[in-house]
Amino acid sequence: MLVFAGLSWFLIEGMEAKRPRGVPEAVPVSLTAFAMILILLSSRLRSGAIRRALSSMPGLGVDLPRLIDGYYRGTLISYLVLAAAAALGLLVALFSGIAFYGIVLCAASAAALAMRWPRADDIERIAQGRRSV
């Protein structure tokens, strides 16, 4: 996220890159909306992967290796989607000619990533049913 934010600032402010000619003003707005959808979607994809790893039959025990694999897979997918949202932030900065727009999208992606950062007790709480996924 920091790399994309840094590139946004460096290319627009440092290198004084100008907005490309012929790009409609709706393009940066559309890319921003798509990036925000990706940020929201990252949470849904993560929780979906974790839910698939849990047993669908109440009363059955939790298969811990399967849960850990689902947690890993969900977190990885979530991070990849957030990285794509940050990359779109760079494109928004380039297409709009304003570095701040890209930096804000990268910051939103970084905040979402920080909220999804794996914690040691997450697996235990999910396995015990004390936390929704």
Image (cartoon, rainbow, N blue to C red):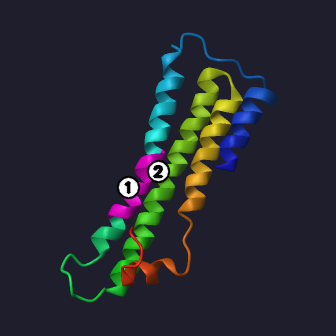
Q: Residue at x 68, y 25 (%)?
A: 98
Amino acid carrying label 1: it is Arg
Q: Amino acid at mark 2?
A: Val
Q: Position of residue 112 (x, y in %)?
A: 55, 54
Label 2, residues with CA under 10 Å away: few <14, some 14-19, many ≥20: many
Q: Is residue 13 left or right of residue 127?
A: right
Against 10, is 106 above or below? below
Disc sitting over residue 81 in the figure:
2
Number of numbered tags placed on the structure image: 2
Residue 27 in the image: above or below residue 121: above
Which x, y percent locates residue 74? 41, 65
Chain part drawn in magenta: 39-48
Q: Which residue is drawn at the image coordinates 47% and 50% (left, top)?
A: 81
Q: CA distance from mark 1 to mark 2?
A: 11 Å
Q: Residue at x 33, y 62 (%)?
A: 48
Q: Dot 1 lies on which element?
A: helix
Residue topped by disc 1: 44
Q: Residue at x 56, y 75 (%)?
A: 119
